[in-house]
Image: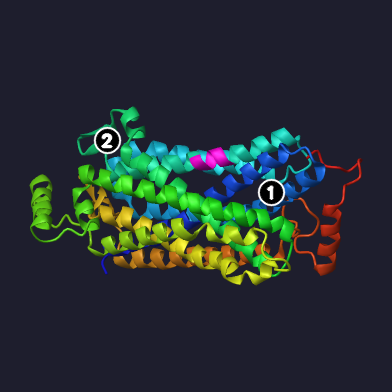
């Protein structure tokens, strides 16, 4: 493999793994913010305390994923700087400002709000605390939006002109209103809702199968299933709408995704050669397979994601939740499919743009930095190793936290990993009414 191939492979690995962190983060922060809003609006103290336990539990999973996701984002920044100087030289005036804003939003505003929220339980007024988690959610989505502004420009460059070989922004309104950006934002919004819903349903079903904290997890099983089903529906609809728009600004990618062949494909090749000159301007054919896999999974999940919710309903007399094993095991099967669909969607969008870094203006070969194959291989191995370790650590920590249940105490409770006796005492305390002198403002 030459340096260009290694750079492409490195970008694919780092971007894919980092995006999985981002998707879980966006989904969970939305769930936590909505749950805390509902808790604050609850008048009954016992019910409010239960809902705040849910905020602490799902918020703990969110904080774990966010912390490790930030590190994966730093890896992404490094590989941008090391391997893609051609992109900076030619398109830096366009992509630099949005990425700078994204960094400020993600690494300063979002992190500050999150720190204040995580350590602010029972220390700041309830409405201020609620505003903090909504600040986290808003800045998370703003950060994602600015990244998608850059990505949308790379898919469909608008609002610029080339001056002496360098792109210059001429219309920020056109850049921000780019259809390629907004189609993707809607598609991603559905995908993160799908992933968050599957995560809620999977964790809830795990505990319900074992008869643990059924009152705590029964509602979240229903909420997760319905959220996953709704997210899958939005994702599929947005995907079809986006597919129709591709025909106008990425006809080569559209032809591959639609499985065109024969004279139709030859006509697309000839049109591309007329616009860009001699060469192979078609993306690899396997991108169409990734797109089909994504579509099949999306439609499947839209049809079946709601099924686990039925396990939380009242059944026959004497029937326990643990007896409804098929419906309670279904989320654990669907969750990996959700991640697979996410990866296939990224491959369809990004690899489908090849051989362009910025469609019609800058090829991947011209965007790659002047790095030797040995140096590119070394950075690829190092970054991949770091990201794989982060992903494994994230999965292990989140799995351990989720299995221990709602009283593990990451956000403001006593003891990070209490033993069984401590957990029993904590659970009993939570179910009672706290004394007036120590009762939280929630």
SS majority, magenta = helix
Among all residues in the image, which is located at the extreme front? 317
Asked whether the viewer can see residue 6, the reply is: yes
Asked whether the viewer can see residue 69, the reply is: no
Q: Image point 72% across, 61% down: which residue?
A: 214
| Dots 2, 1 in contact, CB < 8 A | no
Q: Which residues are magenta?
A: 137-141
Instruction: Give the residue pinned by disc 2.
Output: 158
Instruction: Please name which of the two marks, 2 or 1, marks the residue nearer to the observer.
Output: 1
Q: Residue 140 colored magenta?
A: yes
Q: Residue 103 colored magenta?
A: no
Instruction: Give the residue pinned by disc 1.
Output: 55
Q: Residues within 10 Å of mark 1 (few under 14, many from 20)?
A: many
Image position of 311 with respect to 358: above or below: below
Q: Nearer the viewer, residue 221 or 8?
A: 221
Q: Nearer the viewer, residue 274 or 365?
A: 274
Where does the C terminus fall, quadrant-wise? Answer: top right
Hey, which quadrant is residue 302 in on the image?
Answer: bottom left
The x, y position of residue 363, in whole percent, is 22, 51
Q: Is residue 327 left or right of residue 423?
A: left
């Amino acid at each position: 493999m030459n340096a260009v191939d290694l750079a492409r492979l490195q970008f694919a690995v780092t971007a894919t793994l980092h995006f999985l962190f981002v998707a879980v983060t966006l989904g969970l922060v939305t769930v936590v913010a909505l749950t805390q809003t509902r808790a604050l609006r609850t008048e009954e103290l016992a019910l409010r305390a239960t809902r705040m336990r849910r905020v602490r539990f799902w918020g703990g999973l969110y904080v774990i994923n966010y912390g490790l996701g930030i590190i994966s984002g730093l890896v992404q920044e490094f590989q941008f700087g090391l391997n893609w100087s051609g992109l900076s030289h030619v398109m830096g005036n366009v992509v630099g400002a949005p990425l700078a804003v994204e960094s400020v939003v993600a690494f300063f505003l979002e992190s500050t709000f999150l720190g204040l929220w995580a350590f602010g339980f029972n220390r700041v007024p309830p409405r201020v605390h609620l505003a903090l988690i909504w600040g986290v959610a808003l800045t998370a989505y703003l950060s994602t939006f600015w990244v998608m502004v850059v990505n949308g420009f790379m898919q469909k460059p608008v609002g610029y002109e080339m001056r002496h070989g360098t792109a210059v922004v001429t219309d920020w309104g056109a850049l921000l209103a780019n259809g390629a950006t907004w189609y993707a934002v809607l598609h991603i919004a559905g995908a993160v809702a799908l992933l968050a819903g599957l995560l809620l349903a999977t964790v809830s079903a795990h505990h319900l199968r074992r008869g643990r904290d059924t009152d705590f997890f029964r509602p979240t099983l229903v909420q997760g299933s319905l959220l996953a089903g709704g997210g899958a529906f939005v994702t599929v609809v947005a995907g079809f709408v986006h597919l129709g728009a591709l025909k106008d600004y990425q006809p080569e990618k559209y032809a591959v995704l639609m499985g065109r062949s024969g004279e139709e494909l030859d006509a697309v090749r000839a049109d591309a050669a007329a616009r860009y000159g001699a060469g192979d301007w078609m993306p690899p054919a396997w991108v169409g397979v990734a797109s089909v896999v994504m579509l099949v999974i999306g439609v499947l999940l839209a049809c079946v994601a709601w099924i686990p919710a039925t396990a939380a309903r009242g059944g026959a007399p004497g029937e326990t939740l643990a007896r409804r094993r098929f419906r309670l095991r279904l989320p654990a099967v669907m969750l990996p499919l959700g991640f697979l669909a996410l990866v296939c969607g990224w491959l369809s969008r990004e690899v489908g743009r090849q051989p362009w870094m910025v469609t019609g203006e800058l090829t991947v070969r011209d965007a790659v930095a002047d790095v030797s194959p040995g140096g590119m291989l070394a950075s690829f191995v190092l970054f991949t190793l770091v990201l794989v370790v982060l992903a494994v650590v994230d999965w292990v920590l989140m799995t351990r936290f989720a299995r221990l249940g709602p009283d593990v105490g990451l956000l403001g409770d006593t003891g990070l990993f209490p033993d069984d006796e401590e957990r029993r005492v904590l659970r009993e305390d939570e179910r009672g009414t706290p004394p007036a002198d120590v009762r939280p403002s929630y």
